[in-house]
Image (tube, helix red, strand yellow):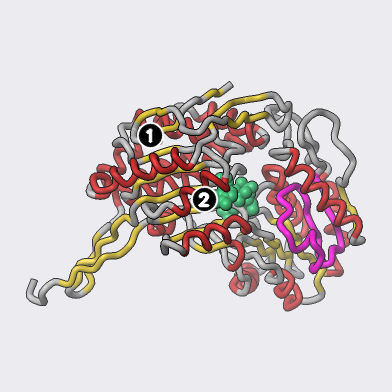
Amino acid sequence: MMNYDSFYIGGAWVPPEGKGEFVIASPSSLEPVGRVPAGSPADVARAVSAARGAFAAWSATTGPERGAILARAAELLEGRREDIAQLITSEVGMPIRMSRAIQAGLPLEAWKRYAERAKTHAFETRLANSRILQVPVGVVACITPWNYPLHQVTAKVAAALAAGCTVVLKPSEVAPLSAFLLAEALDQAGLPAGVFNLVVGDGESVGEALVTNPEVDMISFTGSTAVGKRIARLAAENLTRVSLELGGKSAAVVLEDGDLERAVKNTINACFLNGGQTCSALTRLLVPENRYEEARAIAAKAASRFVPGDPLDDQTRLGPLVSERQKNRVLDYIGKGIDCGAELVAGGLEPVDGPGHFVRATVFGRVNPASAIAQEEIFGPVLSIICYRDEDEALAIANGTKYGLAGAVWSQDEARAQGFAARMETGQIDINGAPFNLDAPFGGFRHSGYGRENGPYGLSEFLEERALQLPQDA
Ligand code: NAD
């Protein structure tokens, strides 16, 4: 059990003003795995005031000074790599083998890279008679979801600290535990008091207290589109800048000459990763009408390998969903898919034995692109295979949802695949199964939000330009 009874505010562990607590239960065994306090608007006020108080001194440090502290934090986190993987598997339910690589591996690598980036980034450039300074935007509120808890926290906090901002983090109350490990590492690394502050709470009271606090200069939010819209509306009151990483309904498009076997297997893996609870999951597979039967057979076989099981077992490929609420939501969508006449290729509504929030890996075929399962973010292991007649129709279907976060294109002719990708209205597109790049800009178009995270793009989100015009003879 990981039990915490205080928040990290102003460089110290302080008892919360709020009285409640969140009990975090394993989504597999339903046994408690940790407890954290439930904060209140008063805790938010204290945390924001600490971040405001620390801003002047932290923003005046040099990039190399900040980088040295971040590098120490990265080393301390590295020492807890296995703890992080086990912890996140216990609270989120991602199979441990994948957790080691993604839930622990990715954020650890990102901390190292932001430490290095802080040391080497040119925060000042010259443009004719102007000195262009990139200055930190100020106090940043980071609000994050539960599905990749440390990865999403890192994309914001590491970049904001590298930029010279001070931070108040409100992680998801569903999976907050790794944020406490991070606070311990930053404290031990010698981060000055008030530069990083941690408060946990629900969205309505604690989240909104943070969003509406006039001392917050920027809100960096990852989560659902509905909450993102609400945050943007609330933030408008103080003209607080906002970056939004929201939902998705991403399409993998197999062009006429694409390698169907590889494309289908790769899409199934990407769709069912973390039980489908991935914002950039490829949840729609577009295939030429005349290759549908072949695609269906490959998909059925590939899906059968995703057998629900204990996420702490090294062999498991499909863990539980994070909560009962999430499980019911996904089952509801599977019911809608059956009701609207889509072909059930794999999985379905049959319950899984055991106490956990399990749902079967489900594939629907010949899905109508206008139906709910092809339009709405399900956030569970559900793939829709959609047939198209020609490339124009494929493009219209791929672009035919309100989202635009990720995508994939498959063709033996790489130039053709890139040409198609250029017409997709989405932020990241993988060509022929190419791997994730931790430094490439990550973010959406339309209802998937605005702003970019990771690498140099993530750093610049937290910087603003200031121009000093110098006399011509300077
Ligand atoms: P959510 O929107 O319910 O919650 C996200 C965070 O916002 C939590 O910390 C929550 O407490 C807080 N929150 C909720 N209501 C709030 C309010 N009114 N004001 C301020 N804060 C509030 O999302 P979730 O269920 O935790 O995560 C799943 C969603 O996140 C999915 O839609 C998924 O696509 C999205 N997501 C997007 C990305 C991305 O990078 N684009 C990455 C991961 C997840």
> Which amino acid type is marked by label 1?
Leu
Q: Mark 2 or mark 1: which comes first in sequence?
A: 1
| Magenta span of residues | 361-386
Mark 2 sits near ligand 1, with its Cβ under 8 Å away: yes
The N terminus - image quarter: top right
> Which amino acid type is marked by label 2?
Glu
As measured in the structure, the alpha-carbon distance from the residue carrying label 2 to the one carrying label 1 is 25 Å
- Magenta stretch contains residue 399: no
In the image as oriented, which residue stretches furthest toward the left?
473
Is residue 390 visible in this depiction of the protein? Answer: yes
Of residues 346 and 377, the one nearer the viewer is 377
- Does the residue at mark 2 contact the one at mark 1 (Cβ under 8 Å)? no
The residue carrying mark 2 is: 208
Within 10 Å of disc 2 (Cα), the crowding (few <14, some 14-19, many 20+) is some
Of residues 26 and 121, the one nearer the viewer is 26
Q: Quadrant of residue 423?
A: bottom right
Q: Which disc number belongs to residue 178?
A: none
The C terminus - image quarter: bottom left
Q: Is residue 458 above or below residue 386?
A: above
Of residues 111 and 179, the one nearer the viewer is 179
Of residues 145 and 51, the one nearer the viewer is 51
Mark 1 sits near ligand 1, with its Cβ under 8 Å away: no
